[in-house]
Image: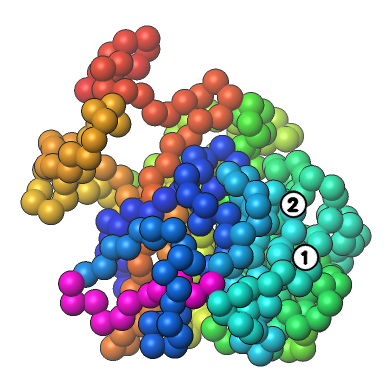
Amino acid sequence: MAARPRPHSTRVSARVRRARAAAGSAVVAAAAAIALPLALPAAADVVDAPVVHAANDAAIALSPLGRYATGVFDESAAEIVAYHARSQRLFSVNAHAAEVTVLDVSDAAAPAALFALQTTGVVAADGSVVREGAVANSVAVRADGLAVVAVESHVKTDDGWLVFFDAAGDGTALGAVRVGALPDMVTITPDGRSAVVANEGEPADDFSVDPEGSVSVVALPKKVSAPGPDAVRTADFHAFEGDALPDGVRVFGPDVPAPDGSLAYRVSRNLEPEYVTVSKDSRTAYATLQEANAVAVVDIASATVTDMWPLGAKDHALPGNGIDPSDRDGGVDIRQVPVKGLYMPDAVAAYSSRGATYLVTANEGDAREWGGYEEPVRVKDLGDDGVPPL
């Protein structure tokens, strides 16, 4: 039984994707090779003035060894990376071009582009085709070289795909399978038997359509090949509708009808799985539900959501929990303030120690802003223009 997660308060810069804010650094548009300092002497100018924050008693330190720049800034041209040891290749998601850049990092000091894994035009096992305008969101690679790319549809509210490649090959796609709407992040279980993908199910930009969020579990072949359509099972949130929703899980915003006009499964449409990690024994997946400020627990064997954990709030009035409460004072002023904040995690990783599973979360925070609906509001506007007072 996995331990209930204890939320961490580490904040990380937002992943550059769609409407989210982009980090203003050249490193964002680069795939960097990282190693322990003892591996190779690091050149001081590999990354200009890297931002470093480490504990005084940190057991290890990381230094940049090499860098590859796409030449594209602020357009999600280098996001998620995965490494394949046998081929000494690094795979970097280029959402801007709907492809994955393949880098030769046999010389870590000088990563070199080989080619790109093209996802558009690939025919899936159900006969659907990845069309122009589709977006590559995530990549994972199994030890034997089976590479999996999560691709959202050119219409983001439609179902997306997992596209498969040979990490040591020439970039030819092995095939694809259909998963849920907006597959945002994919991972492979430690035993290599399954791919697990978080189908975020974001609404249309005008909030006219809001697909259900879900988590798909795909049984992987033993060899480097693409699975068939029967390998896909999808865990939904139907069991948590209405009064079955745990207290503290946030469900809010416009109630968008399903394509058939039905208002059923409101909770399922509202929840948006963001990121997924898997326990060491490959039995349980954990998916962050960022806007809902919660984590979903998925049984991999049955592809079922078995639990949902609300994460609660952090008291910023307590020592050690200070924040910089203003973005208009022109400086950094971290201090204790009498407010509470939500964790709202993006990335999550699982590790085991002494028989217990722990989750480490990057608590990015987020806000829902689609169409005419805007969740954020400034304190001075509380009580005005229909906004409730404190």
- Image quarter hosting the N terminus: bottom left
Question: Residue at 47% across / 26% down in the picture?
Answer: 374
Q: Quadrant of residue 223?
A: bottom right
Amino acid at dot 1: Ala
Q: Is residue 148 left or right of residue 344?
A: right
Count residues near mark 1 (Cα–Cα under 10 Å), then give few for <14, some for 14-19, many for 20+. many
- Horizontal and vertical percent position of residue 273: 53, 54
Question: Residue at 74% across / 59% down in the picture?
Answer: 99
Question: Residue at 42% across / 42% down in the picture?
Answer: 366
Task: Give the CA distance from mark 1 to mark 2.
Answer: 10 Å
Residue behind mark 2? 97
Residue stretch rendered in magenta on the structure = 56-66
Residue behind mark 1? 116
Q: Quadrant of residue 157?
A: top right
- Image quarter hosting the C terminus: top left
Q: Is residue 214 visible?
A: no
Disc 1 + disc 2, Cβ < 8 Å: yes
SS of the residue under disc 2: helix
Q: Observer-nearest residue: 202 or 47? A: 47
* Image vertical order of residue 385 relative to residue 47, above or below: above
Q: Which badge, 1 or 2, is on the more N-terminal residue? A: 2
